Image: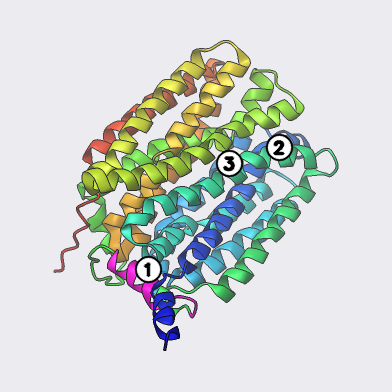
Amino acid sequence: MASVPQLQDQSAVRTRVRHKVLAFCCALAAVTYLDRVCIAVTANDIMRDLALTPVQMSFVFSAFTFAYGLFEIPTGHWGDRIGSRRVLTRIVSWWSAFTIFTAGTFNYASLLIVRFLFGAGEAGAWPNAARTFSRWFPSSERGTAQGIFFMGAHLAGGLTPILVARMLTVMHWRWVFVIFGMVGFIWAFFWYRWVRDEPSEHPGVNASELKWIEEGRLVQAKHSGRMSDFIQLLGQRNMLGLCGMYFTQTYGFYFYITWLPTYLENVRGMKSMKLGLLAGLPLLLSVLADLLGGLSTDYAVKRFGLRWGRASIGLIAFAAAAGFMAAGAATADVTTSAVLIALAAACSAFPLGAAWGAAVDIGGNRSGMVTACMNTAGQVGGMLSPVVLALVVREFSSWAMPLYATAILYGFGALCWLIIDASKPLRIQRS
């Protein structure tokens, strides 16, 4: 008889399957940045072998982002309809194939087409990851989950320049893309076999963990399955604030993963491993910022409620990013400038947990669509960022001007947080 209470106590202890789901999503984030950042580090080699100009290379960078933004909302909506498990399996398999196909490009047109299709395939990955968090995590844990997710992405992004710089000393740039592409296929295989769309469908989740997750979800609007819902979203104050804020965040971020290595090498005169280290520093510092930002927003939510628990983190961090970026552009010392720019990147990464947490809080059962709308606005910024920089540098022979423009945009992003209220879920009216 003494064993019965013991069994009851054991059954009351929550399982931690949701943490393993988070680990899978972190691996997903890492693979996305492994593939994205690789082309920035190999840009000089690619331009040399394919006889590309810097402006042509900027369009190659933006081809990915354009396609990514174009297909983001449909793929996020697709995840809301059929679940993230199958959609993410397709996404990762597709982009891994086109990472490998990048190695086979032979001129400007072929590279442009492959990178466009690469972006089309990767579209919807992060909204579907956010949708996974909306199903697997209570609201009180989502900021931290999103922060850890971005930490995985930025850790991979920060280490990739160092890794690629080392790989390029022993192999051609084409083989780098082949090796990186294979990693995604491995992830897709294990994701489809183990993960489920709902905690209730997973055999490893006990009643205690299921209760904790489901009772911690906010009241969710019923999902109609209609693509037309997103038209109503775009006119709502929360959606406008999220899109404006994320446009500025991603505009700045794409500088770090596209032209920063070239800027440090060609303008600041850095070489070899120092170049790899300082090119990766923005994302390495962002790793800590992601985690602390996620923890901070969940703590602030408990203290100040959903609105200011999300918004205060974003407001302060974006203002700091603006200051650091402006200082980095104005500083003459090479290393100091690189460090200040890296600090700007870390500050802009600090509120990512708050941003995606707020989007999921607002979206409910439409989290895939809401996060996709926000991320699409970000991709517009990401698409413009490398092209605007290349054109400004060509016309004015100044790298400082586009950096100052990024600082101003960060300031605008801080203001956007004043109109974001995560405590007010989206409203869809039926005719």
Which three-letter amino acid code belongs to the residue tagged 2?
Answer: Ile
Q: Which mark is residue 162?
A: 2
Q: Which quadrant: the C terminus?
A: bottom left
Label 3: state its secondary structure: helix
283 left or right, relative to 80: right
Q: Residue 48, position in %: x, y?
A: 76, 34
Say which label, 2 or 1, has the lower sequence index. Answer: 1
- Judged from the image, the secondary structure of the residue bearing numbered disc 2 is helix
Task: Give the residue at x 49% y 36%.
Answer: 253
**Which residue type carries mark 3?**
Phe
Disc 3: which residue: 61
Q: Is residue 75 visible?
A: yes
Element type at marker 1? helix
Which residue has dot 1 on it? 80
Which residue is rendered at x = 25% and y = 66% of the image?
220
The range drawn in magenta is: 203-216
- Specify the amino acid type for callout 1: Asp
- Left or right of 294 on screen, residue 395: right
Of pointers 1 and 3, the one earlier in the residue sequence: 3
Distance (Cα) linking label 3 and label 2: 20 Å
What is the residue that sits farthest to the right in this orientation?
Answer: 170
Is 69 left or right of 427, judged from the image as shown?
right
In terms of image quadrants, where is residue 348?
top left
